[in-house]
Amino acid sequence: MPELPEVETTRRGLAPLLVGQRIRAAVVRNRSLRQPVPRALPRLLAGATISGVARRGKYLLIDCGGGDVSREAGAPLRAGMRPGESAPAADGEMPDTRIRTRRGGTLILHLGMSGRLWVVDGATPPGSHDHFDLVLENGMVVRLRDPRRFGLVLWCEGRVLDHALLAGIGPEPLDPAFDGAALYRATRSRSAAIKLVLMDGRTVAGIGNIYANEALYHAGINPRIPARRVGRARCERLVDAVKRTLELAIDAGGSSLRDYVGSDGMAGNFQSQFMVYDHAGGPCPRCGTAIRGIRQGQRSTFYCPRCQR
DNA sequence: CCGACAACCTGTGAGC
DNA sequence: TGCTCACAGGTTGTCG
């Protein structure tokens, strides 16, 4: 499910619901994801205000930097205290401004192979693979479901783009800085197949198996060609195809995000526009030749042997 | 530096 | 029906 278009679709769905909201609690039911969910996460998140929902590659970044100035950091909400109400300062003392300004940080989420974020109400019982909840003061719950547990839930203080997991990622594919010249430069030393290099996050962020297959089809490039042998003009074409494919998929709401923000949420339907992915043996939409299915780097590759040279 | 491969984990569908 | 196997949208680490 989650490649860049699905993560972006999720981001766009969540952002208007989350930005400006205060987090009441974080619930961790299973810490064993790709990396252990930090033990301190519930403490760090409780009381934080969400100031933004961003994306880098396939990582979702929930900015909790909005200072929590209405109650003392670390102090639990007292029973009966209304959300947003200030805790009274200890008798006679001035409130300590140091602890009233939250340090802030970013919640880093990755959906792995099988992760999804849902918005449910607080009464919805969690399923067996619902590992993490973000409970908002307004009662909404953002729930992470990830059966295979290749996903991530991490916390980062300071500049999140410098985080070890993000620092080495290549340019955003939809950024103007990712152009034919950039891809050409990045591939000169790469003898691996162009499809594998395209899926390598250091080359460009967020291109997974589906969209690597689709973009190479649209560009008319054989996925097995060594990257360094893809010339200037073909790099231009490939970048155009990557951008066009991703934008179309985002417009379609991703490839299979169903009900991710409740029962009336968007249902992505980009699957219906796949030209080659999962179409082995079927006819090429352009020339009718049978789509070929092969293995590259332990992933399935699909291409038209006639249209892609 | 590069590339090939295994590993992490659960669910699903095909074939017997 | 039930078993076994291959494979699934991602990433990281190890080895040669």
Image (spheres, coloured by chain):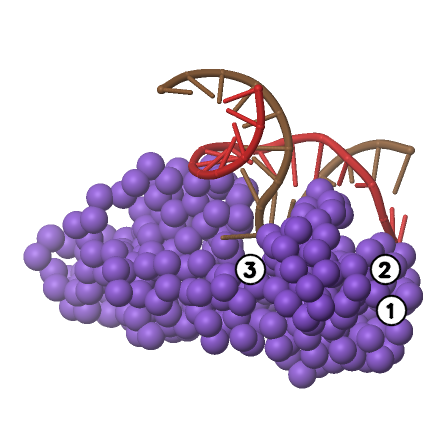
Chain colours: A purple, B red, C brown
Question: Are the residues flagged by discs 3 and 1 in contact, CB closer than 8 Å?
Answer: no
According to the image, label 2 marks what residue?
A: A225
Report x, y in % for residue A98: 37, 67
According to the image, label 3 marks what residue?
A: A3
Question: Are the residues flagged by discs 1 and 2 in contact, CB closer than 8 Å?
Answer: yes
Chain holding disc 3? A
Chain holding disc 2? A
Look at the picture and state if A219 lies above or below A154: below
According to the image, label 1 marks what residue?
A: A230
Report x, y in % for residue A154: 49, 52
- Which amino acid is tagged 2? Ile
- Which amino acid is tagged 1? Val
Report x, y in % for residue A284: 67, 63
Dividing the picture into quarters, in which one does residue A184 lie?
A: bottom right
Q: Nearer the viewer, residue A266 or A30?
A: A266
Q: Earlier in the sequence, mark 3 or mark 2?
A: 3
- Of badges 3 and 2, the one in the foreground is 2
Q: Can the viewer see residue A201? A: no
Instruction: Name, please, the residue furthest toward the front.
Output: A288
Question: Are the residues flagged by discs 3 and 2 in contact, CB closer than 8 Å?
Answer: no
Instruction: Report the number of discs.
Output: 3
Q: Tag 3's secondary structure? A: loop
* Residue at mark 3 shares a chain with residue at mark 1: yes
What's the distance in space between the residues labelled 1 and 2, CA to CA? Answer: 7 Å
Report x, y in % for residue A282: 63, 55
The answer to whether A1 appears left or right of A144 in the picture is right
Q: Earlier in the sequence, mark 3 or mark 1?
A: 3
